[in-house]
Amino acid sequence: MIRIGLGRDIHRLVPGRPFLLAGLELPAERGELGHSDGDVLAHAVTDALLGAAGLGDIGEFFPPEDSAWRDADSMGLLKTTYKKVKDRGWKPVNVDCIVICETPRILPYREPIRDALAAVLELPREAVFVKGKTNEGMGPVGEGLAVEALTVCLLERE
Ligand SMILES: [Zn+2]
């Protein structure tokens, strides 16, 4: 059996916060505002995994109002989620991601970002892809006020 999941997330970008993607800090003047560490890509992948397995969404598993997740390491939350999915017999086949922001450029950091996600999901790098896009200057993302991530994840079970 195979199942597909879709994840989407957006965070405001503000000065004085690190710009995190899959746990890697990219050089940037602004970073994600969030109750957790704000790692927009880790959150989108987490939601895609949960959706594919039919388990719920990130807000149910890690409620923002729960102080336990304040400044939480989102890659740790992804690891916890992956374990839940794996415990139910699911194995990721591949993950494909889009990160949308005006700056920084994603391409120079793409391979380490792929490796970071692949390590958590126990996948080869080839099974994890990350594309950087801009929003062509339009809307809050285009004005540099936000960063958005979209992810699809395929799971299989014997
Ligand atoms: Zn988020």
Image (cartoon, rainbow, N blue to C red):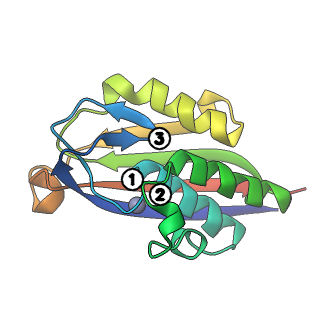
In the drawing, does residue 28 fall left or right of residue 4? Answer: left
In the depicted structure, whether residue 121 falls above or below residue 113? below
The answer to which quarter of the image holds residue 36 is: bottom left
Which residue is identified by label 2? 44
Q: Mark 3 is on which residue type?
A: Ala
Which residue is identified by label 3? 22
Q: Position of residue 37 (x, y in %)?
A: 40, 51
Label placed on residue 40: 1
Mark 1 and ligand 1: say if the CB distance to the nearest ligand atom is below 8 Å. Answer: yes
Q: Secondary structure at mark 1?
A: helix
Mark 3 and ligand 1: say if the CB distance to the nearest ligand atom is below 8 Å. Answer: no
| Label located before the other in sequence (2 or 3) | 3
Quadrant location, the N terminus: bottom right
Q: Residues within 10 Å of mark 3 (few under 14, many from 20)?
A: many
Q: Position of residue 39 (x, y in %)?
A: 40, 50
In the depicted structure, whether residue 112 falls above or below residue 8? above
Residue at mark 1 to residue at mark 3: CA–CA distance:
8 Å
Q: Position of residue 2 (x, y in %)?
A: 76, 60
Q: Mark 1 is on which residue type?
A: Val
Which quarter holds ligand 1? Answer: bottom left
